[in-house]
Amino acid sequence: MQKHATRNHRHHDTDLGDDLIKIKAALRHATRDIQDRANEAFSNSYDDLKDKSFEMRENVGDYIADKPLKSVGFAVLAGLVIGFLLKKS
């Protein structure tokens, strides 16, 4: 009877070891999947940001070309505000 109990114990240990191997493989797979998704999301975000910054640059350039005096006025006003804030510090 003791041999039977020992065999069951070994069988149980083998099942546990197999389960741990499966869990480890599943975790590795899940980790790779998460990394791939994060890399893709970061890449997409970077590309979107790059596209939007390019569009903003074009829009600002168009605005300056269409309204040069107003643009110079904004630049002077921004310079005065920044100078005032820096002088105050």
Image: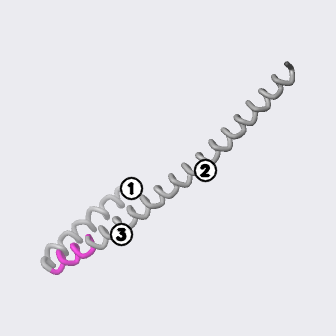
Q: Quadrant of the C terminus?
A: bottom left
**What is the three-letter code of the residue carrying label 2?**
Arg
Q: Magenta stretch: residue 61 in it? A: yes
Q: What is the secondary structure assignment of the residue under circle 1? A: loop
- The answer to whether 30 appears left or right of 69 in the picture is right
**Contact, mark 1 vs mark 2 (Cβ under 8 Å):** no
**Viewer-side residue, 34 vs 24:** 24
Tag shown at residue 50: 3
Q: Is residue 68 above or below residue 82?
A: below
The magenta segment: 56-65
Whole-angstrom CA distance, mark 1 to mark 2, is 54 Å
Kindly identify which residue carries mark 2.
Answer: 28
**Contact, mark 2 vs mark 3 (Cβ under 8 Å):** no
Whole-angstrom CA distance, mark 1 to mark 3, is 35 Å
**Viewer-side residue, 20 vs 58:** 20
Q: Nearer the viewer, mark 1 or mark 3?
A: 3
Give the residue at x 32% y 58%.
85
